[in-house]
Image (tube, rainbow, N blue to C red):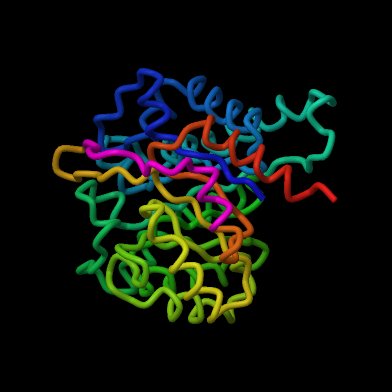
Amino acid sequence: MILDGALATELERRGADLRDPLWSAKLLIERPDLIRAVHLDYFEAGADLAITASYQASFAAFAARGIGFDGASRLLRSSVEIARSARDSFWADTAVRVGRSRPLVAASVGPYGAMLGDGAEYRGRYSLSDAALARFHRPRLALLAESGADLLACETIPSLREALVLADLLREFPDTAAWISFSCKDGRDTCEGQDIGTAASALGTCAQIVAVGVNCTAPGHIVPLLRRMREKTSKPLLVYPNSGEDYDADSKSWSGCATARPFAAQARDWYDAGARLIGGCCRTTPSDIRAIKRWSAQLERP
């Protein structure tokens, strides 16, 4: 399955100003049409799934902007409605259906650290208790579970502890499936420091978690991370790395260069290492997804 690529950095590339605690969720208020256009471009590039603009869209983040529960609920639902609208528009063209399945919509569930806006999703080590973490995540999970999304994308999770809190909360919504995707600091450990194989193994008994993997992590770390996960879990593995550039949480800016090797060429290595859901995260574009689509078509040839 081909996932989509970056949303927020692609919106910025198209002129959006996301210098705001809500990040891409700001455009749920101001420019939902631009979010829809990006989703549609990824479908046209070959993505089999769109991840919604709800990564930063927690009730706490909206409250900090003076948006109450009802308003936040409407905006969270709209993130799914926008992605579904783009999917349905794309799928209405019967010509695109040849050799493809109807694309899915995954509702993004970002970590607690994303709400802090200080790069904590790349550190973990929260001061909150498990109970407080659950209180933070529960209302958004409850809403997105009945939003019409096909599944939840619990993504950029820096720690096994937060992943286990999310896995436990899923039991409150037994008809909901999710994937859990970690942010990692190297080829071995989550950003907080747990072995990625141990993390994948710990989630193995939760039937509602339909895939585990890694996102927003440098491409060079992906193969060793996949190998460690493959040894410890039979669940499908997913990867959607960033471009390889470095993010500075203080200045909210990117520096350095993307990995020199083409993204789609690296996707072949990820596939060989066990990944079966492959896409891109920050600083990747529809062009990267189109290149992955071209490569994946070769796998289907006799």
Tally of numbered tags: 0
Residue 85 appears in the figure: no
Identify the residue shown where x is 82% and y is 33%. 97
* Residue 143, image x, y percentages: 53, 50
Q: Is residue 71 visible?
A: yes
Query: Relative to 40, does residue 298 appear above or below in the rendering?
Result: below
Q: Is residue 160 above or below residue 302?
A: below
- Residue at (58% x, 26% y) in the render: 41
Q: Return the residue nearer the eye: 121 or 197.
A: 197
Asked if residue 257 is among those painted magenta in the image, a careful observer would answer yes
**Nearer to us in this view, 106 or 72:** 106
Horizontal and vertical percent for residue 61? 31, 44
Query: Is 93 within the magenta?
Result: no
Question: Is residue 122 found left or right of 106 in the rendered image?
Answer: left
Q: How far across and how far down the image is residue 139, in percent? A: 45, 55
Q: Nearer the viewer, residue 125 or 241?
A: 241
Percent across and percent down for residue 68 are: 35, 39
Residue lying at 29% horizontally and 38% vertically, measured from the top left? 257
Q: Please, is residue 42 above or below residue 142 in the view? A: above
Quarter of image, res 221: bottom left
Q: Which residues are magenta?
A: 253-269
Quarter of the image where one finds residue 209: bottom right
